Image (spheres, rainbow, N blue to C red):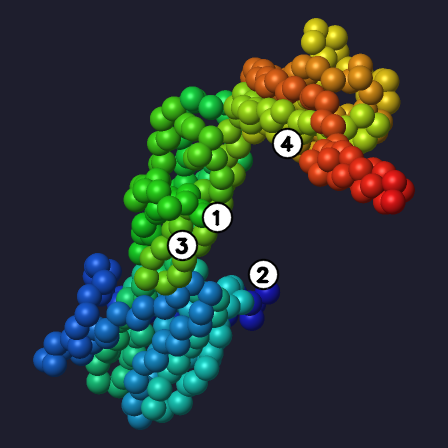
């Protein structure tokens, strides 16, 4: 170390020692007091600031001030115009005969605590202390992932959040008129049913803000097929049988005539599946197409089926057609005899 550097370091050590001797102020819990009017050690009201904001620390000076400094616990932030803190968020705002003000930008939880402004005058020292309280908005830090379960399973959802003040956590099922909710980090759903599948919302809230995240629950269950409806079709016309199944995951469909499975495109028949609906289409119904049909819906959890009857339907003949023709024929015979 060079000689000038040595003396600079020595002078800083001497200043630090004198400030520490000056600051025999106990670092206690935060208080809200204007201090004792009979003492030179003043305690200011707590400063409450939100995480990410900027806080200003102001300290009154005087005409006879010889040394002044801002300290955080035992660390000197500023000694007069000299910055001792290596934190780039800390900077000098004002230093004159009236006030000594510094600021801390982008405040974080690590900045919470007691700050002291030490002033040395020609007569005696005095201090002004203030406690910074940092409020932190809630943040959900641990959340259950989206899950897929079978109907009847027991489900537990977890949602943990941080923040200051400590946030309250609650659960609810979105788009539900029921009472499925929890005022706790955990939501217990015993023997879950398909009606309780959906999107669950976790909300963490404190005095500062709210954080919301969601979890999707998919409930698998076996197919349930709607009852088949018999259909009457005229020979040579188009016929259609529809089979609908409620299932998760979506069901696969199979069609049978009596005990024989029908393959797509076989004997002029077409099978079209779309989501929960399957259609068996006849483009030109023949006598051989009439009979009993079975639709089977299946997924990995089970099967379900329903039956249909397709029968012949004949065009109605007007009830007056033949009687009217007979009457017309008789009238023509009468006119001819004359």
Query: Residue sitting at 70 percent across and 21 percent down?
Result: 311
Q: Is residue 240 left or right of residue 114?
A: right
Q: Quadrant of residue 222?
A: top right
- According to the image, label 2 marks what residue? 1
Of circles 2 and 1, the one toward us is: 1
Q: Position of residue 64 (x, y in %)?
A: 29, 90
Label ID, residue 32: none
Q: Secondary structure at mark 2?
A: loop
- According to the image, label 3 marks what residue? 138
Q: Quadrant of residue 14?
A: bottom left
From the viewer's side, name the closer residue of 100 and 295. 295
Query: Residue sitting at 60 percent across and 26 percent down?
Result: 229
Q: Residues within 10 Å of mark 1 (few under 14, many from 20)?
A: some
| Residue 222 in view (yes/no) | yes
Q: Is residue 98 left or right of residue 212?
A: left
Label ID, residue 213: 1
Q: Residues within 10 Å of mark 2 (few under 14, many from 20)?
A: few
Query: Residue sitting at 45 percent across and 52 percent down?
Result: 212
The answer to which of marks 3 and 2 sits earlier in the sequence is 2
Q: Is residue 121 above or below residue 335?
A: below
Label ID, residue 276: 4
Of circles 1 and 3, the one toward us is: 1
CB under 8 Å between discs 4 and 2? no
Q: Position of residue 34 (x, y in %)?
A: 17, 77
């Amino acid at each position: 170390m060079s000689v000038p550097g040595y003396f600079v370091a020595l002078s800083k050590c001497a200043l630090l020692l004198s400030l520490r001797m000056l600051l025999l102020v106990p670092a206690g819990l935060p208080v809200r007091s204007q201090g004792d009017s009979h003492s030179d050690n003043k305690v200011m009201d707590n400063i409450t600031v939100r995480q990410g904001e900027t806080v200003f620390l102001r300290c009154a000076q005087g005409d006879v001030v010889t040394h002044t400094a801002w300290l955080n616990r035992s660390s000197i932030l500023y000694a007069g115009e000299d910055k001792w803190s290596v934190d780039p968020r800390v900077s000098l705002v004002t230093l004159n005969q009236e006030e000594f003000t510094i600021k801390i930008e982008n405040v974080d939880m690590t900045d919470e605590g007691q700050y002291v402004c030490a002033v040395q005058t020609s007569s005696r020292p005095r201090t002004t202390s203030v406690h910074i309280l940092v409020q932190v908005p809630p943040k959900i830090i641990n959340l259950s992932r989206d899950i897929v379960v079978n109907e009847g399973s027991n489900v537990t959802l977890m949602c943990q959040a941080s923040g200051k003040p400590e946030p309250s956590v609650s659960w609810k099922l979105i788009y539900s008129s029921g009472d499925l909710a929890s005022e706790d980090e955990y939501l217990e759903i015993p023997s879950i049913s398909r009606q309780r599948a959906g999107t669950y919302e976790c909300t963490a809230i404190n005095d500062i803000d709210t954080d919301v995240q969601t979890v999707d629950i998919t409930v698998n269950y076996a197919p349930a097929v709607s009852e088949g409806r018999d259909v009457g079709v005229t020979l040579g016309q188009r016929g259609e049988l529809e089979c609908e199944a409620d299932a998760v995951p979506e069901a696969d469909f199979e069609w049978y005539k009596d005990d024989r499975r029908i393959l797509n495109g076989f004997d002029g028949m077409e099978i079209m599946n779309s989501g929960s609906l399957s259609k068996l289409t006849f483009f030109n119904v023949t006598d051989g197409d009439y009979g009993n049909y079975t639709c089977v819906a299946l997924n990995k959890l089970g099967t379900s089926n329903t039956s249909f009857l397709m029968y012949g339907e004949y065009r109605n003949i007007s009830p007056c057609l033949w009687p009217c023709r007979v009457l017309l024929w008789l009238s023509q015979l009468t006119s001819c005899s004359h």
